[in-house]
Image: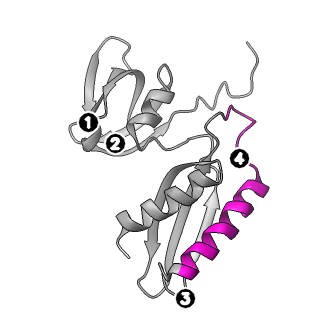
């Protein structure tokens, strides 16, 4: 089954269970595909997101759906998890949700993985950012983004101000 069709099927089921599909990756081989599904709650906050029980609930529902529809074949691996602290930014809605936060981005026209502050998402095509030098601002086309995750300052994580 094409990834787009599979994505729609999985998104609909995850949404119906009251969660948000953050990311879907298909890896593995044709004979043994691996589906990596990351879910979240729309209202999640640090420390109050998806639980292991939530992942198990979504996993069981996805297994039933995928197997009854014959979507991935008999020898697939399904991994359901939270998006984690370095949450992927995939859609324009993800970028909008985290305006004011920092992200690490790999995109056409940027050197390596660049850290930016998310300033605005004026439409579903682009994101306005401030680069790590604190001076330069610019736009990144979302179609040019190869990979983006929220940036975590590991040195200050967990410290109270």
Mark 1 and mark 3 residues within 8 Å of each other at the beta carbon: no
Taking the view exactly as shown, the residue that stands out farthest to the left is: 109
Could you tell whether 101 is left or right of 59 in the image?
A: left
Real-space Cα distance between discs 1 and 4?
33 Å
Could you tell whether 121 is left or right of 42 in the image?
A: left
Mark 1 and mark 4 residues within 8 Å of each other at the beta carbon: no
Mark number for residue 110? Answer: 1
Q: Which residue is mark 4?
A: 50
Residue drawn at x 26%, y 21% as measured from the top left: 138
Q: Nearer the viewer, mark 1 or mark 3?
A: 3
Q: Which residue is mark 2?
A: 106
Q: Is residue 140 above or below residue 27?
A: above
Q: Quadrant of residue 126?
A: top left
Q: Which of the two labelled residues, at mark 4 and mark 2, occupies the earlier sequence position?
A: 4
Q: Is residue 119 above or below residue 23?
A: above
Real-space Cα distance between discs 1 and 2?
7 Å
Q: Which of the two labelled residues, at mark 1 and mark 3, occupies the earlier sequence position?
A: 3
Residue drawn at x 56%, y 41% as measured from the top left: 86
Q: Which of the two labelled residues, at mark 4 and mark 3, occupies the earlier sequence position?
A: 4
Would you say residue 48 sits in the magenta stretch?
yes
Residue drawn at x 51%, y 62% as measured from the top left: 10
Other residues around mark 3 within 10 Å, as few (<14) / some (14–19) / many (≥20): few
Task: From the viewer's side, name the closer residue of 51 and 159.
Answer: 51
Real-space Cα distance between discs 4 and 3?
28 Å
């Amino acid at each position: 089954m094409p990834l787009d069709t599979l994505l729609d099927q999985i998104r609909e089921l995850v949404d119906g269970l009251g969660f948000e599909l953050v990311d879907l990756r298909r890896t593995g081989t044709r004979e043994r595909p691996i589906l990596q599904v990351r879910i979240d709650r729309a209202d999640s906050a640090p420390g109050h997101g998806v639980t292991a029980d939530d992942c198990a609930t979504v996993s069981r529902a996805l297994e039933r759906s995928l197997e009854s529809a014959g979507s991935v074949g008999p020898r697939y691996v399904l991994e359901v998890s939270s998006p984690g602290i370095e949450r992927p930014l995939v859609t324009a809605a993800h970028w909008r949700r985290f305006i004011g936060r920092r992200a690490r981005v790999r995109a056409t026209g940027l050197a390596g993985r660049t850290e930016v502050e998310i300033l605005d998402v004026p439409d579903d095509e682009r994101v306005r950012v401030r680069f790590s030098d604190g001076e330069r601002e610019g736009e990144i086309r979302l179609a040019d983004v190869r990979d983006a995750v929220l940036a975590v300052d590991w040195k200050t994580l967990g410290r109270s101000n």
